[in-house]
Amino acid sequence: MDYSPPIPLLIDTDAGVDDAGALMLALASPRGHPLAITTVHGNVPVRQATQNVSLVLDVMGREVPVYGGASRPLLGAPLDASDIMGPDGLGGVTAWMQPSMRQTRSSIAAVALVQWLTHQPEPIRTHLVSLGPLTNLALALALKPDLPRYVARLVIMGGTSEARGNASAVAEFNFFADPEAAARVLGAGFKEVWLLPWETSLRYPIAWAEFDALLQCKNPRTQFLRNITGYLRERLQRLGLPGIVLPDFLAMLVALYPECVQESIPVHASVETEGRLGRGLLAISWLPGGSDPNLYLVTRLDLQMGLEVLRDLLIGGN
Ligand code: RIB
Ligand code: CA
């Protein structure tokens, strides 16, 4: 029995396949109490991201307010990840699944984040989990610069630990999609930031056989997960990966089950916003006696513990 009190969560997402896995975890886990979900450009255009979140809520049978957010980064044009996640970010399932009829809220995501955070009871317990480009959060900070004091913990999927990029040679997708926003967020003075970088995600793929075993159980959640991961599976197998890589699912695990974290390193890191090759790079200072740490870099996880959590969540949908 898990007696930990549920963690109030605000989740900001660009609603690709791994975001959907993270949302399912947050919605099914007794540890999570999602207060609201905000959407942002990234894997797909923001309207599609909002539709995808609504679909996940339908599958999970949950009512959580959804707020649409930024359709583009602070500078430049939005990216997309349809090459790896499918045309709708969910492996193409929206072409044949019943579209969600949910209404989204009228407030804009950045405003909603400020409202939810500043209206919570003391002591401050809300965790903010960011699974896409950080545009909404940067806009929220522009509206309310002291916002960090209303966030108990900020968990970010983004950046790299060794400059091995997945969107450019040196930059990870979420940071590359809006480097200015990422730079503002890391420099904003949040009390506790946990950052799950791309390399840590790559270190913990769920082996294909193990993933198939998880999908054996027959229920709507498992069926949905099987359907949305098909496209990604094909792409990753073609690249020779030994299993499915789900960065945002791992980030949500860090948020809800911090005991899964086996190693985290306090470092000072900032984001490169200039440069022909370096834009979006997470520059980590490893110099002894350098600036004070501004985040915990998560480098090792107990994936087995994470898989047990995932198994429970899938079986719970029977
Ligand atoms: O680099 C991985 C991240 O980019 C994940 O958040 C994934 O959903 C994509 O947005
Ligand atoms: Ca994402």
Image: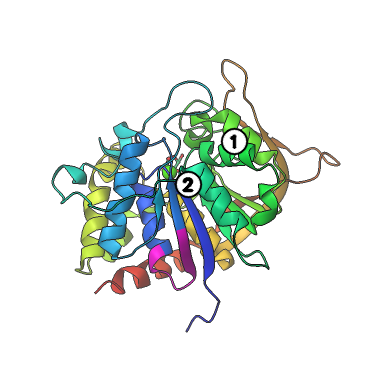
Q: Determine which of the numbered discs, if any, sits on residue 182 in the image.
A: 1
Whether ligand 2 has any atom under 8 Å from the Cβ at mark 2 is answered as yes
Taking the spot 62% from the left edge, 55% from the top edge, the residue there is: 118
Do callouts 2 and 1 mark residues in contact (Cβ within 8 Å)? no
Instruction: Give the percent coordinates (x, y) of residue 206.
Output: 38, 55
Kind of residue indicated by mark 2: Leu
What residue occupies the far bottom of the structure in this picture?
Answer: 1
Q: Is mark 2 on a helix, strand or loop?
A: loop
Query: For mark 2, what is the residue?
Result: 131
- Residue 121: image quadrant is bottom right
195, 79: nearer the viewer: 79
Instruction: Give the percent coordinates (x, y) of residue 303.
Output: 47, 61
Taking the spot 65% from the left edge, 59% from the top edge, the residue there is: 152
Instruction: Give the percent coordinates (x, y) of residue 316.
Output: 31, 74
Q: What element carries label 1?
A: helix
Q: In which quarter of the image is the C terminus?
A: bottom left
Q: In which quarter of the image is ligand 2?
A: top left
What residue occupies the far top of the structure in this picture?
Answer: 276
279, 298: nearer the viewer: 279
Q: What stretch is highlighted in magenta?
A: 27-35
Magenta run includes residue 22:
no
Kind of residue indicated by mark 1: Ala
Q: Could you tell me if residue 304 is visible in this image?
A: yes
